[in-house]
Amino acid sequence: MNQPIITTILSSFEEATDIKTITFRYPGKITPGQFYMIWIPGVDEVPMSVSSIKQDVKGITFRNIGDATQALYRLRKGDQIGVRGPYGNGFTLTGKRPLFVGGGTGIGMLAPLVEQARRKKLKSTVILGVKTKDELFFEDRFQQIGATVLVSTDDGSVGYQGFASELAKDIIKKERIDAVYTCGPEQMMRSLLSFCKTILFQASLERYMKCAIGICGQCCIGRGLRVCVDGPIFDGTTLKKVQDFGVYRRDAAGRKIPF
Amino acid sequence: MVDISTSIGPLQLKNPTMLASGIMDEDAGSMQRMIDCGAGAIVTKSIGLKPREGYANPTVIELDHGILNAMGLPNPGIELHGDEIKKLRATNVPIIGSIYGADANEFVSLAQKMQQFGANAIELNVSCPHAKHYGLEVGCDPDLLQKIVSSVKQHVSLPVFVKVSPNIMNLAEIVQSIEEAGADAIVAINTVKAMKINLETARPVLANKTGGYSGKAIKPIGVRCVYDIAQAVDLPIIGVGGITTGEDAIEYFMAGASAVQIGSAVYYRGPEVFKSVCDEIKTWMKNHRYTKITELIGAAFR
């Protein structure tokens, strides 16, 4: 049933400056790339992709950026939130030599997918793109499961200086990558797509959501593609036809906001 | 041969399944997809003069037998939405511009804009159960309603439909005043005012506390309203409320509806619901030896 189930926060951990992971008990299956609607009673309800899956305990990783995430950021172990879902389609792990490109908090939701790839013994490379060193997280987590981790920062404070998409462009060629999975700023993902002419591409999109069950139309892109139901993961073939991709999103009133 | 085309006053529909207002209709792309999926007409999201964000989430939840929402009339305002309607000019499916306002002047300006943008009819939302100063607050005042309808009719040449609420005791009086004011059709019903309380937190789930209930649970309420309206006025009626299958639509036709609108069933059965319902209507009619929708309209009271 699509209404929030109240659950208790089991842990709240600061991953980096203004970035936290909270975990909670919420039984049931979820595929990497799917999301929950997280209700902070009295504040808001927001979509959050899953960033850790350990049987009945699930986690989300987010940046303290708006009213809802600020409220979530302040919650502690033992506090209550409402959860409904999972929603959306999730990633489909195909290809033998995957590259994962996470930009900013987009890094978080890629983690369960990288874990899935490593369980299948796929040689996996992860690019973590952040503005600066202080915003870097999950580097250890990816290394511990045996993925090759590369870091890019806008300011060069650690790793490659420049955009994650530029770093990815080199890796795709050198490592003979056959599939790219990404979540991050849409302009980054759009330029990444331009480097993936012949290889598999899956991107996780974020839009303002209301119903999450495919009826209100708030999160639609292109010719009525519902990010909440038909997405949030879209493949390259689909995204090449979506004019909004990397260009604009729509706010709560439906006004188009350029990225 | 079964013919499921229908008409609402001067408006011809290739099939009787219309997209209800507020579902997949914020931008041209969404409405286009519903046309691709077989909707016989599209009703836009309810549009006001200015952009409006609506309420905070949760705005929509599913209950055991229906869907509860309090969106709060979010819309980008008439000017921006006009750009979306203009993109649909090439389609041969009628586009009905839904509008909301607080008084006759607002409704007139909005209707004129809709006509200018290329809408094929106007639907007046005077029945939204959860927006202060708008919707139901306008639609339960017969004098104000009559003034709005007659003013809009004076200023636009398009057919004008009025969407009414089940949340009123004087439904017959209201629809008679709408008919006297010159409206072309009645749309019934809007959602039923309702609430869901979460037990663990002891608070209403919707941010707005109350909302409108739609989906399967409200079908008998809608059928009753359409039946009552058909006794009270001679106008065509568009039935809406819980229509999920072809047989649901047929029940509404028998109660007096000439066409139906589908909203929540886009959730229950996906965007393909329009084609499925049309196929089911055809099959039922064939099996029961009906050839035209007109043979069914009002069958329950003829």
Image (cartoon, coloured by chain):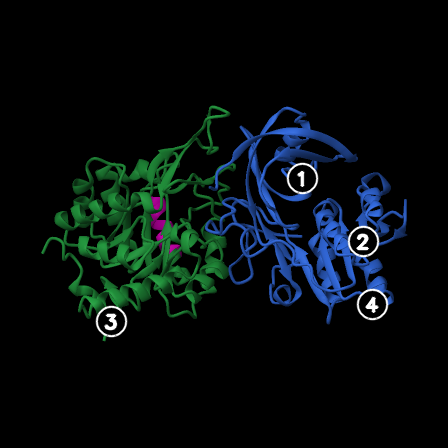
Q: Amino acid at mark 3?
A: Asp
Considering depth in this image, is B96 or B208 the residue closer to the camera? B208
Is B41 situated above or below B138? below
- Label 1, label 4: how far apart the Cα atoms are: 32 Å
Q: Which mark is residue A176?
A: 4
Q: Earlier in the sequence, mark 1 or mark 4?
A: 1
Q: Amino acid at mark 1?
A: Ile
Quadrant that contains the N terminus of chain B: bottom left
Q: Amino acid at mark 4?
A: Arg
Write the start and end of the magenta stretch as one range.
B104-113
Residue B10 can be seen in this image: no
- The residue labelled by disc 1 is A60
- Label 4, label 2: how far apart the Cα atoms are: 14 Å
- Label 2, label 3: how far apart the Cα atoms are: 58 Å
User: Which chain is blue in the rendering?
Assistant: A
- Of labels 4 and 3, the one closer to you: 4
- The residue labelled by disc 3 is B3
